[in-house]
Image: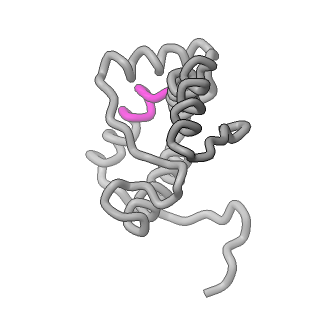
Amino acid sequence: MTDPVEGERISLRLDAEDLNLIDDFIANSNEFSNRSQLARAAVRAYIEMREGGSDGANRPNEIVVQLPPMVLETIKTLVAQGMYTSVSDAVADGVRHHFLHEEHVEEMKKEANQQGNSFKVVPGA
């Protein structure tokens, strides 16, 4: 198999029902603006899920999270308003704020010291 050329095109035949499903999803999405973006993300996600096991994550810092509808809609609104660049960015920011706020980090350091463990906060995590 030869190396694919950057931006190489492929053809995919879908029936009207699948195209409607895709178009409806894109219309309601703040992450994807066209079929190609969705197809690239879907192909990557499918392959990573198959290679990475049942939880869909094959990289140590990636997980699959199912959010309550109200939470997801709130995050999508924040993305649409420009507060975040994507749903993933918003979720990561929320997790960082929850787990890495100063009081929580200090508490974790104290617990680690009491147990004789080392504790390190990774910058940019």
Between 7 and 17, the one nearer to me in the picture: 7
Q: Residue at x 53, y 36 (%)?
A: 114
Residue 31 visible from this viewpoint? no
Q: Is residue 62 above or below residue 106?
A: below
Q: Is residue 95 above or below residue 14?
A: above
The percent coordinates of residue 23 (x first, y second) are: 40, 37
The percent coordinates of residue 5 (x first, y second) are: 72, 70
Please report the bounds of the magenta region as a residue range: 24-31
Between 77 and 103, the one nearer to me in the picture: 103
Q: Is residue 13 magenta?
A: no
Q: Residue at x 29, y 24 (%)?
A: 68
Q: Residue at x 56, y 21 (%)?
A: 97
Quarter in which the N terminus is drawn? bottom right
Answer left or right for 94 relative to 71.
Answer: right
Between 124 and 79, the one nearer to me in the picture: 124
Q: Is residue 92 above or below residue 18?
A: above
Q: Residue at x 42, y 64 (%)?
A: 52
The percent coordinates of residue 25 (x first, y second) are: 38, 34
Quarter in which the C terminus is drawn? top right
Q: Is residue 99 above or below residue 61?
A: above
